[in-house]
Image (cartoon, coloured by chain):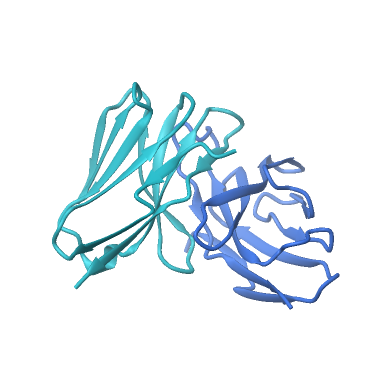
Chain colours: A cyan, B blue
C-alpha cells in the first residue's frame, strides 16, 4: 500500500549547494516524517511535521507541508559530503500506530 | 546506552530452512515493527506489535512469523514458505502515545541471503 512517493528518485549536487526533495501522498494524513538512511544502515529520524503545521526547521533542514496539494518538501541547505544518503518520507494515517514509507530519494553530494 | 539492536548483521540461509532474526530494545518502547527493504526500494511492513503478547500482520506477512513475549524483544522468523527472502530486514520501535507525535527508532538491520 504505497502512500508517499518521493521525487526525484536520485539527485546529485555539488557540495555547498542546496538539495530539495519532494514527497507526494494520496490520502489525508495525521503527520509526515522524514528519515535518512546511510547505505546499509538503519533509518534515522530527521523531522516530523503535523498536518496543522506548514513549515518546520531543524538545523540545515527545512520541511514544508501543503495538505491541499498533499505534498511535502525537504530542503537541505549548504550540503555536505556527509549528507550523501537516501531520504524517505513517511506518512501517518492515524491508524494503529503504523506509518507508511515512500521509496526514497538517493542524494549524492559531489566534492 | 539506550538503543535497538539486531543480530546477526549478515545471515545466510539454505533453501527450505527457517531462520530467526533477533531484535532487542532497551528504550522501554511499547511498539515494535519489522520491515523488509529490497534494493532501491522503500520499507514494507511485515509485522508490528503495539503491546506484549499481541501483534498484527503488516502488508507482507506471508512466510513470516513473530512473537512478543517480552517488551524488549520482537524476533522475526523467516520460514521456508517465504519464497523470496533475500532482503535487508529492519526492526524499529516507538514509544507509547501513537505515531501522531513520535518517531520510530531503527536498528542497524540484518541482511539475509538465501544460498
Q: Is residue A19 left or right of residue B103?
A: left
Q: Quadrant of the C terminus of chain A?
A: bottom left
Residue at horizontal 38%, vertical 28%? A70
Residue placed at 78% from the left, 59% from the top? B82
Compared to B29, does B16 lie above or below?
A: below
Image coordinates for residue A17, horizontal then vertical, percent: 15, 58
Q: Image quadrant of residue A15?
A: bottom left
Q: Residue at x 49, y 26 (%)?
A: A27
Residues A72 and B40: in front is B40
* Residue at x-position 32% and y-position 42%: A22
Observer-nearest of B9 and B63: B63
Q: Quadrant of residue A38?
A: bottom left
Q: Position of residue B14 (x, y in %)?
A: 79, 76
- Screen quadrant of the N terminus of chain A: top right
**Residue B115 in the image: above or below residue B104:** below
- Total numbered labels placed on residues in the image: 0
**Residue A33 vs residue A19: left or right?**
right
Depth check, front residue: A14 or B69: A14
Measured as percent of width and height from the top left, residue A101 is found at 50, 44
Which one is nearer the viewer's eye here, A53 or B6? A53
Spot occupied by residue B108 in the image (x, y as percentages of width and height) = 52, 65
Q: Is residue B23 above or below residue A48?
A: below
Determine the image quadrant of residue A25: top left
Left or right of B103, for residue B26: right
Amino acid at each position: 500500500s504505497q502512500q508517499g512517493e518521493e521525487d526525484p528518485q536520485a539527485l546529485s549536487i555539488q557540495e555547498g549547494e542546496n538539495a530539495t526533495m519532494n514527497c507526494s501522498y494520496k490520502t489525508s494524513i495525521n503527520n509526515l516524517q522524514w528519515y535518512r538512511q546511510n547505505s546499509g544502515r538503519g533509518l534515522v529520524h530527521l523531522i516530523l511535521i503535523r498536518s496543522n503545521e506548514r513549515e518546520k526547521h531543524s538545523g540545515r533542514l527545512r520541511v514544508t507541508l501543503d495538505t491541499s496539494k498533499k505534498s511535502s518538501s525537504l530542503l537541505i541547505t549548504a550540503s555536505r559530503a556527509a549528507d550523501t544518503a537516501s531520504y524517505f518520507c513517511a506518512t501517518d494515517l492515524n491508524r494503529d500506530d503504523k506509518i507508511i514509507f515512500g521509496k526514497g530519494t538517493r542524494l549524492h553530494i559531489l566534492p | 546506552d539506550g538503543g535497538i539492536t539486531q543480530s546477526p548483521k549478515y545471515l545466510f540461509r539454505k533453501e527450505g530452512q527457517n531462520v530467526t532474526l533477533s531484535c532487542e530494545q532497551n528504550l522501554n518502547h511499547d511498539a515494535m515493527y519489522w520491515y523488509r527493504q529490497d534494493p532501491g526500494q522503500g520499507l514494507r511492513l511485515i509485522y508490528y506489535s503495539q503491546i506484549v503478547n499481541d501483534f498484527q500482520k503488516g502488508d507482507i506477512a506471508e512466510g513470516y512469523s513473530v512473537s512478543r513475549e517480552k517488551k524488549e524483544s520482537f524476533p522475526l522468523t523467516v520460514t521456508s514458505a517465504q519464497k523470496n527472502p533475500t532482503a535487508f530486514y529492519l526492526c524499529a520501535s516507538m514509544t507509547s502515545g501513537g505515531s501522531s507525535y513520535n518517531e520510530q527508532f531503527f536498528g542497524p538491520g540484518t541482511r539475509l541471503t538465501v544460498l
